[in-house]
Image: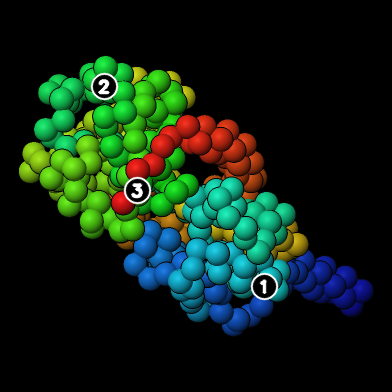
């Protein structure tokens, strides 16, 4: 090889190394931790953030820290104002990020201030009914709807928060089934479950982990799940959509970055989230907690957000027709 040929080959090799290193340099700063900002300790978003942190730590080989902020508004505000470099991310649900602004003022724009990265997990609620309620002898959604239509306004359901998943799941059920039910507000799930088991309220659209143990003892009946299709989380309970086409109130937890984050950073993180959620031990922990791990592209999450904002606007308008008793 001549000196000129060697020099040319060396230059080409350096160029290839530089090109290979450039995307990595554009993605994350070496050694800098990633902060996953989420709501308080103990909830579903906290659980998902901690599983994601373990998975990302394994695939990225860098510190990934979960930062809990107690208020549902504070995590979004923190990330919206963060440096858009991929090191401060928001783990949240659609119910918090883009449904909450329908009910109260928030210090951010749920669409303009956040760049979608990936979905993380999904789980349905279960339509759980006190076993003593008439119209449940066959564990049939249709039978229950017929009973509710025959006795308008006599069925009370648990509402743990206005605009929360239990509330909106019941509202959509009422609208599509053409039944009138009464919302009963509760400050905590524990009190709500006590009243559901005693029959003071008749139904609760609840996370599977809360109600399924009581279904197994026969105190409650699980009539349907709120996901559009059958869920691997509660595989023996049919979807409500099998009787009410179009019904879909699945909870989806997601990952967002501050707006203006570089596209290369967003797509790198999305790819690594998929790798993290694909690890067998991570999948096992999600399923054990009643959640289905579910990654996505940034575009898929953006589409979900746009469609759900429009859908929730209509649903929340319909919720005005649901009366709430005082408690």
Q: Earlier in the sequence, mark 1 or mark 2?
A: 1
Residue to which mark 3 is pinned: 326
Q: Which residue is most to the bottom?
A: 31
Q: How many marks?
A: 3
Which is more toward the observer, 49 or 251? Answer: 251
Q: Quadrant of the N terminus?
A: bottom right
Q: Say what secondary structure mark 3 lies in.
A: loop
Q: Earlier in the sequence, mark 3 or mark 2?
A: 2
In contact (CB < 8 Å): disc 1 and disc 2:
no
Q: CA distance from mark 3 to mark 2?
A: 21 Å
- Give the mark nearer the N terminus: 3 vs 1: 1
Q: Which residue is mark 1?
A: 82
The reply, left or right, for residue 18 in relation to residue 306 is: right
Relative image position of residue 158 (x, y in whole percent): 31, 44
Asked if disc 3 and disc 2 are in contact, CB closer than 8 Å, the reply is no
Task: Tell me the quarter of the picture where residue 224 sits.
Answer: top left
Q: Nearer the viewer, mark 3 or mark 1?
A: 3
The label on residue 236 is none
Secondary structure found at label 2: loop
Compared with 238, 164 (above or below) is: below
Residue at image location 60% in from the left, 41% down from the top: 309
Q: Position of residue 67 (x, y in %)?
A: 49, 75
Residue 291 appearing in the image: no
Q: Residues within 10 Å of mark 3 (few under 14, many from 20)?
A: few
Residue plotted at (18% across, 43% down): 200
In this rendering, the label closer to the viewer, 1 or 2: 2
Q: Secondary structure at mark 1?
A: loop
**In front of the other: label 3 or label 2?**
3
At a point 11% along the width and 33% down the height, the residue shown is 132
C-alpha span from label 3 to label 1: 40 Å
For the view shown, which residue lies furthest in the front direction? 326
Q: Position of residue 285 (x, y in %)?
A: 30, 58
């Amino acid at each position: 090889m001549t000196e000129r040929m060697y020099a040319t080959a060396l230059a080409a090799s350096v160029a290839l190394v530089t090109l290979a290193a450039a995307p990595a340099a554009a993605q994350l700063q070496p050694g800098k931790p990633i902060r996953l900002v989420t709501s308080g300790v103990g909830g579903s978003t906290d659980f998902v953030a901690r599983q994601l942190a373990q998975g990302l730590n394994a695939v990225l080989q860098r510190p990934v820290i979960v930062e809990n902020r107690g208020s549902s508004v504070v995590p979004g505000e923190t990330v919206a104002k963060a440096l858009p470099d991929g090191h401060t991310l928001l783990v949240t649900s659609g119910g918090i990020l883009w449904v909450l602004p329908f009910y109260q003022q928030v210090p951010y724009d749920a669409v303009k201030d956040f760049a979608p990265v990936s979905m993380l997990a999904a789980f349905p609620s279960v339509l759980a009914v006190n076993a003593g309620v008439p119209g449940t002898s066959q564990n049939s959604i249709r039978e229950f709807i017929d009973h509710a239509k025959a006795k308008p306004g006599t069925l009370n359901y648990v509402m743990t928060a206005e605009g929360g998943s239990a509330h909106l799941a019941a509202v959509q059920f009422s609208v599509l089934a053409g039944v009138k039910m009464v919302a009963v507000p509760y400050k905590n799930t524990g009190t709500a479950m006590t009243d559901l088991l005693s029959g003071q309220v008749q139904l609760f659209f609840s996370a599977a982990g809360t109600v399924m143990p009581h279904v197994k003892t026969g105190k409650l009946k699980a009539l349907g799940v709120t996901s559009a299709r059958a869920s691997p989380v509660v595989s023996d309970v049919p979807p409500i959509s099998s009787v009410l086409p179009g019904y879909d109130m699945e909870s989806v937890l997601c990952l967002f970055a501050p707006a203006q984050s570089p596209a290369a950073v967003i797509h790198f993180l999305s790819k690594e989230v998929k790798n993290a959620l694909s690890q067998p031990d991570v999948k096992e922990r999600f399923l054990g907690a009643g959640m289905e791990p579910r990654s996505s592209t940034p575009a898929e999450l953006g589409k979900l957000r746009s469609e759900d904002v429009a859908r929730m606007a209509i649903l929340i308008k319909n919720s005005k027709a649901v009366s709430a008793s005082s408690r």
